[in-house]
Image (cartoon, rainbow, N blue to C red):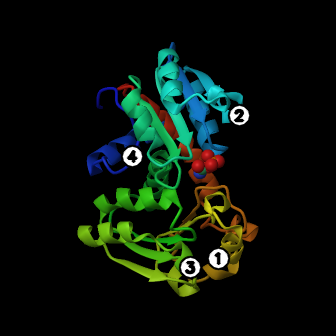
Amino acid sequence: MRQTHSFVSIGGLTREDILSLIAEAAEAERQPNRTLLQGRIVATLFFEPSTRTRLSFETAANRLGAKVIGFSDPKVSSTTKGETLNDTIRMVSNYADVIVMRHHLEGAALYAAEISDKPVINAGDGAHEHPTQTMLDLYSIHKTQGGLDGLDLCLVGDLKYGRTVHSLIQAMRHFNPRFHFVAPKELAMPDEYKQQLQAWGIPYVEHTDLTPEVISQCDILYMTRVQRERFQDLAEYEKVKDLYVLRAAMLGGARENMKILHPLPRVNEIAVDVDDTPHAYYFRQAENGLYMREAIICDTLGIPLH
Ligand code: CP
């Protein structure tokens, strides 16, 4: 367990850090209700909409005995009066012991961590990263596959703006993965991430169609939503929004162990008939977020769960 520290990026975590957080999340799942954070204040500052991330962080804080302050909509904060992010973070650092923040600007969490004398947890910064989502994804993969090493992962949908997939490939680099990327050319995995994979010697194959043959080659099928809010031109969004719809009929050749993950919310990309298949794991994945976020809050405060 490290000293008090911020959690803004997945890139700085080692294999050992990741496995340690997974072990802590498993411990949180074994006993989710504790008093480890009694007397502490957790601030949740959500400058962008959220259901799962904010509510699971707030549930995690409450289940660990902390109190929660913050806002779920910046319109009710002094941001609307022109207060800068710098000043907001300075103020909240006076009140809270840890700050959980989602912001539309890439790098906002790192900026906040540099200003704050309290740990800052990145709950999503624009199209950049969503590292706590990645940790709950890794926990879900570890639980369902019995480990993280040597897996075939297929990432589908918005690989350009999808911050969850950007963080996931960075984290998985420690575990010898093989990737399939399924996206239209407008939403392809950005070159910077592909160059990183090449430098790490990690194989990937790019596809434009989600076929049963591609599905049959993976242990994890990671579906993503095409993010309307990231498009400047809505006509471009309309062209690509419904390109990939996963249906139960497409899963006949899937490996027995294959699990479908999705950070949620979904729009049309997973038909509801998939929900009743043994491959669907996305609602359990969201539940795992509670345990992982208990582990992450405690980790940033240097408090072991074990
Ligand atoms: N997965 C995720 O970040 O969901 P929310 O946007 O609802 O927090």
Q: Which mark is residue 9?
A: 4
Mark 2 or 4: the one toward you: 2
Q: Of callouts 1 and 2, which one flags the residue occurring earlier in the amino acid sequence?
A: 2
CA neighbours of label 4 inside 10 A, class few (<14), some (14 to 19), many (20+): many
Q: Please say whether residue 208 is visible from this viewpoint.
A: yes
Q: Which residue is mark 2?
A: 75
Q: CA distance from mark 1 to mark 3?
A: 10 Å
Amino acid type of the residue that numbered disc 1 sits on in the rendered structure: Tyr
Quadrant assignment, res 224: bottom right
- Labels 2, 3: front one: 2
Provide the residue designation for mark 3: 184
Q: Secondary structure at mark 1?
A: loop
Q: Measuring 61% from the left and 37% from the top, which residue is drawn there?
A: 46
Q: Please tell me whether mark 1 or mark 3 is closer to you in this view.
A: 3
Mark nearer the N terminus (2 vs 3): 2
Spot occupied by residue 79 in the image (x, y as percentages of width and height) = 63, 31
Q: Residues within 10 Å of mark 3 (few under 14, many from 20)?
A: many
Disc 2/disc 4 C-alpha distance (Å): 27 Å
Q: Secondary structure at mark 3?
A: loop
- Foreground pick, 116 / 300: 116
Q: Which residue is mark 1?
A: 244
Q: Amino acid at mark 2?
A: Lys
Q: How many marks?
A: 4
Vertical position of residue 175 compared to residue 121: above or below: below
